[in-house]
Image (cartoon, coloured by chain):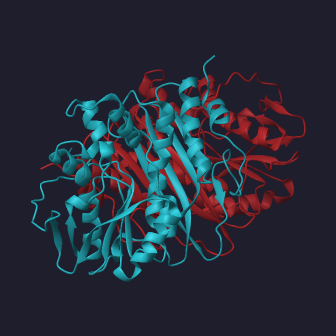
Chain colours: A cyan, B red
Amino acid sequence: MPLGEFDLIGRYFTRPARRAVLGVGDDCALLAPTVGMQLAVSCDMLVQGRHFLPNVAPQSLGHKALAVNLSDLAACGAQPLAFMLALALPRADEAWLTDFSRGLFTLADAHGCELIGGDTTQGPLNICISVFGDVPNGRVLLRSAARAGDDLYVSGTLGDARLALESVRGAVALQRDAFEAVRVAMEQPQPRVSLGLALRGVASSAIDVSDGMLGDLGHVLQSSHVGATLDVDAVPRSAVLAAQQLTWQLQCTLAGGDDYELLFTAPPSLAAAVHAAAEQARVAVTRIGGIDAQPGLRLIDAAGQAVPNTYGSFDHFCS
Amino acid sequence: MPLGEFDLIGRYFTRPARRAVLGVGDDCALLAPTVGMQLAVSCDMLVQGRHFLPNVAPQSLGHKALAVNLSDLAACGAQPLAFMLALALPRADEAWLTDFSRGLFTLADAHGCELIGGDTTQGPLNICISVFGDVPNGRVLLRSAARAGDDLYVSGTLGDARLALESVRGAVALQRDAFEAVRVAMEQPQPRVSLGLALRGVASSAIDVSDGMLGDLGHVLQSSHVGATLDVDAVPRSAVLAAQQLTWQLQCTLAGGDDYELLFTAPPSLAAAVHAAAEQARVAVTRIGGIDAQPGLRLIDAAGQAVPNTYGSFDHFCS
């Protein structure tokens, strides 16, 4: 007998509500907002071939589908509370569901983020998660508040996910252990939730790096009406990526996509607070440039020489 | 030059935030909850071939994608506030986007429900909407609160959407004007938001009829730990459906799916209040049975004779 929609939800995606007033199982879920807090909401849809490879382990996919959403909360300095999962599946495959839900809930539990509702249907594989977090009134981190004179920072390292993808595509040859190292970045990104929380009141602006760093930085510059100068050699990269040709290093770090690190700005007077936040969150942060009053983005190398910007950002309809 | 993801969002899906603190354009949107209110949230994913036909007009699809979500808010007695749209499209087709967004926003505006965020990507057509509404603390309408002795009601008429689908499938032959009449029910359902609001404090339980009435009633009975007796002849149906064979009438009204009417219960002492709520919301409501202490569902006809229940509910993985 095939597994029905309600059995599937009951078996894999229903847990008792903890913080939510009402969880999975009614027409709506109910959240009781905390006085003095605003609710941050975001959603991301993952499609096979665009956001993950057909052969990805379902457990990694469950992790990544939630991770990319938690990354949006992190970029706003919001504390994760809850999420909804909408899932289109070609068929109700119990082995797949077991592994997918394990990856999903392991990450959810690590962030105290509970599943409160969703939808399942038959169709081409598609995973759409909506997340809810809260942030004290007026303390949200926005893209639009970078100011001239601010330092520009990025967390962790950039480019490994893209390097892994290029290896799968056959464009780059990697040894097995090198591939396994960067594959983790592609399949199991770690959302920088703790760093986002620690940067409240410290960072002037933040965004998560999802479509390629220069493109994401462009959104910050455009909405903040400022420009920036960025040292391409200062952009942090893993040892595996640093061992590749320089053109690949630049392509992957500047326009890789799928990094889920935080790109943020802060005034120089708060540099010590930035590093304290990084230490508290146990994530490296690196200063990679500065915000200018003059619009536009200027790339330089470690010697201060101009570098031409030939790095396109990832676009789901043009790439 | 192809339309890029951010152009697409900017052109078709960005409007200034009205009620939301922060709308489309950052990593998250921000909602400022009202003191004394809880937030009702729900999401539904629509897939071609499962929830709509390939040849449906994009404007109708935009309407329906939001309507099915507003129907969930209606079933909880929640006032719509905002929604997020995640959209996978095979390609960025501007004519399609123009019509789809027109249908979407026409319904959204009619309910004061604003678009605050979302995601777009390339992929097999998939529409996932998350809705947000609010409801005063403790006033939500639940599936789980039907009580023995309550009357059982349904709004509007049931079965037209299924009749239209069976006509498209060739199982039922309809004249052109008859088909056009029931096609509206299939393609442009009207969420019963006003009725849901008017039933707060009146109905003891409510659910929206989306997977077939008997199946949805089953959810109410199961979560309320009660049974019901239902008069199949009392279930309201359109003139078009009433002109079909009785077996089609019963199949479509009892297990049709895609109705988006409200099925609700209320104590007999509040019958006048039920009818006042219906009048206020300008929707017909019909008493179709009653809730029993004895578990299980008993179908009877107008003469009180038992009718066998052979009507399966719609299941996305088994149908």
Q: Residue at x 27, y 41 (%)?
A: A163
Residue B47 visible here: yes
Q: Residue at x 29, y 30 (%)?
A: A175
Q: Residue at x 79, y 30 (%)?
A: B300
Quadrant location, the C terminus of chain B: top right
- The relative height of residue A216 versus residue B255 in the rendered view (above or below) is below
* Residue A185 in the image, given as x and y percentages of width and height: 39, 43
Q: Residue furthest top?
A: A1
Q: Quadrant of residue A147?
A: bottom left
Q: Quadrant of residue A230?
A: bottom left
Q: Residue at x 28, y 50 (%)?
A: B97
Left or right relative to B136: residue B56: left
* Residue B235 in the image, given as x and y percentages of width and height: 68, 38
Left or right relative to B190: residue B9: left
* Residue A85 in the image, given as x and y percentages of width and height: 54, 44
Q: Nearer the viewer, residue A199 or A208?
A: A199
- The relative height of residue B228 versus residue B116 in the rendered view (above or below) is above
